[in-house]
Image (tube, coloured by chain):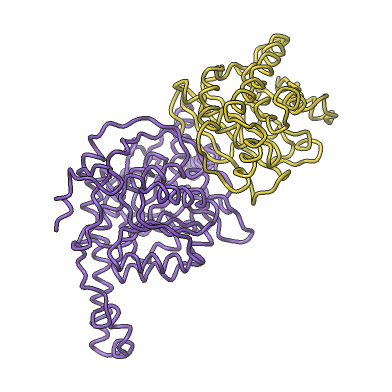
Amino acid sequence: MDSKSLIGTYNKKGQKIVDPDYLFFEAPRERHFMTGSEVVREAIKRANVDVSIAYPITPQSEAAAMVGDLYVEGYVGEYFRGENEFAVMSECAGASFGGARVFTTTSGPGTLRAYENFPMWVGSRLPIMLNMMVRGVNSPLSIQPDTLEIGLIIDTGMLIWHAESAQEFFDFLLKGFLVAEEPDVHLPIAVCIDGFFVSHTKDDVLIPSADFVIPPYNPYRNPMPAMDMESPPVRMMRDPFVMKSNYISYATQASWQQETRAACERSRKHTIRLLGGLIEEDNSDAEILIVSSGTAVAQGREAKRLLAEEGIKVGIVKIKTIRPFPYEEVRQATKNAKIIFVPEFNVAGWMAREIKSTIPDNHRVIAGPHVAGGMTMPPEVIVTEIKKVLAKKKETVHG
Amino acid sequence: MRKRVNLRMSGLGGQGVVTSAHVLATAASKEGKFAISNPFFGAEKRMAPAESYVRMAEEKIYDRGELVYPDVIMVFHPQVITMGKCYTMPFYEGIKPGGLLIINSDEPLPLEKDDIRFLEEQNIPIFYIPATTLAVEIAGTELATNMGMLGALMGATKIVGLDAMELAIEDRFGKKYVASGGTATLDEAIKKKFAKKAQLLKKNMDTIRRVYDLGAEWAETLKTPMLV
């Protein structure tokens, strides 16, 4: 059964199932002014979600509560509150194993509590949609945004997308289901936003009618055999032979794990088509570039405007997909840059590390400015950092 | 009016500081302006510091998060100043020259000499408005303090019009709204106070209109224009 054959029919709620391309690119859209939490409600309303499981933690609680409203209204098939975040993510796995389209939300300490499940989802090839509204996880504790959380899930094997604005968030949520569920991908996806700066911020969003939904998940497109005690990966866990270092276990682990990484890479072609590329460039042939993801880019855009007033030209490269990482795109976009600034909302500077390990002549990368623990990054801070570095360069040249 | 106006609202948890920012930004959006609003607070508590921000412009705004360089600061409770219940110290930290300060207080507060000198030098007028007293008088509840503050701002600056504000108020209070636990509790409290939603909307608008006029009167007394 092909889910495309359902196009033109109606779901239980009476919404018309349309070609996703129609919903994404052609359907008329209306302008709304809403918070990121409300964006979740609007996206999930149009997503034919079978199961959603929630657990409260700031800043994702409002969004999770609104998905509960959608369940009451009949837009979501099943919804309940899990016992804790670990339980939620395990229950999501169960629902996804059962062939459901699954959506859940998490933040900061909740993400870390549930962590064990994420690589397990990947290995089990479960196309679960996880919305991460990132916040501080360190002590001193903060409920405000901090992207360390994204850096911590970077090698789980999930697809990881990072939205800058409410509009991008809406589009990423819907398109994410499509890419994650492709048979040659079939992996969980984390659609990340910066908590509060997107989740609690009211912004303009263009949204198509809620009379339309994307086609439901079609479990028959799952490339995996049914998960039972006789098939991998469950069988591997049951049988002691794979726990030992022998040829069979080596071959099993290597092929299985490399295949999940390869599946993540294969998501590129679908993602490029739907998102219009893995990166977005603005004046990227400038000698000074700001490269980052999420709202650090938004702050960079304001810094670009402030610097232009002083005659300093700056370009922007926004990275939309953290995994798969747009290696070639970043190399191309930064090839003319003399200095590359990477502003980040975390203390580790993981994005700067990613870029340094990607491009030639990586001494060009300035890892900063950084703020952490939920602190704000006014554009003026980026401007000051850029001017400070430029002044130093001048000193070196002349002195 | 400046091409881009940044507003910082400093108050105490429970006063409707976050709600005011969202309502004001919604009104600006209804008028076709670009706007962004967001709150900033710690774990929720009544009477603990809470802040919210509105950015408004004729051009697209990317900037978000805590607002460090405001054009306008609105102080919703005297304790923000007198007890330092504020994320910035002093409370006007970062304000741009030629800006505006609106303070909810029945009488002028005993500001430090240095503070008064700084504000004068930066050409920042202070508009004292007894928003809570007026809210109790007009709406019959101090929960309408935030409406009074919005009225004061709108009257003094004409930053958004009353018609757009009415639409924004209808948007926020006229239909189901999902918010955090604390906000939901306060929403319930005020809905109980006003037997009907229509009455709640009317009392809010009454408060805004009355204080709007007071704001407009105050602005006329200024010798130099603000926010230019």
Quadrant containing the N terminus of chain A in the rendered view: bottom left
Q: To which quarter of the image does residue A50 belong?
A: bottom left
Q: Is residue B114 above or below residue A238?
A: above
Specify whether residue A219 is in view: yes
Visual hue assigned to chain A: purple
Farthest residue to the front: give it: B195
Point out residue A344 in the picture as x, y percentages from the top left corner. Answer: 48, 50
Q: Is residue A245 shown left or right of residue A374?
A: left
Q: To which quarter of the image does residue A227 belong?
A: bottom left
Residue situated in front as seen by the camera: A5 or A295? A5
Specify whether residue B126 is in view: no
Residue at 64%, 39% (x, y): give it. Answer: B51
Point out residue A244 in the picture as x, y percentages from the top left corner. Answer: 32, 90
Q: Give the number of marks.
A: 0
Q: To which quarter of the image does residue A169 belong?
A: top left
Point out residue A348 in the picture as x, y percentages from the top left corner. Answer: 50, 59
Point out residue A332 in the picture as x, y percentages from the top left corner. Answer: 27, 47
Q: Is residue A309 shown left or right of residue B129?
A: left
Residue at 25%, 34% (x, y): give it. Answer: A27
Residue situated in front as seen by the camera: A392 or B160? B160
Q: Is residue A388 shown left or right of residue B226?
A: left
Residue situated in front as seen by the camera: A336 or B142? B142
Q: Is residue B174 shown left or right of residue B227?
A: left
Label the yellow chain with its letter: B
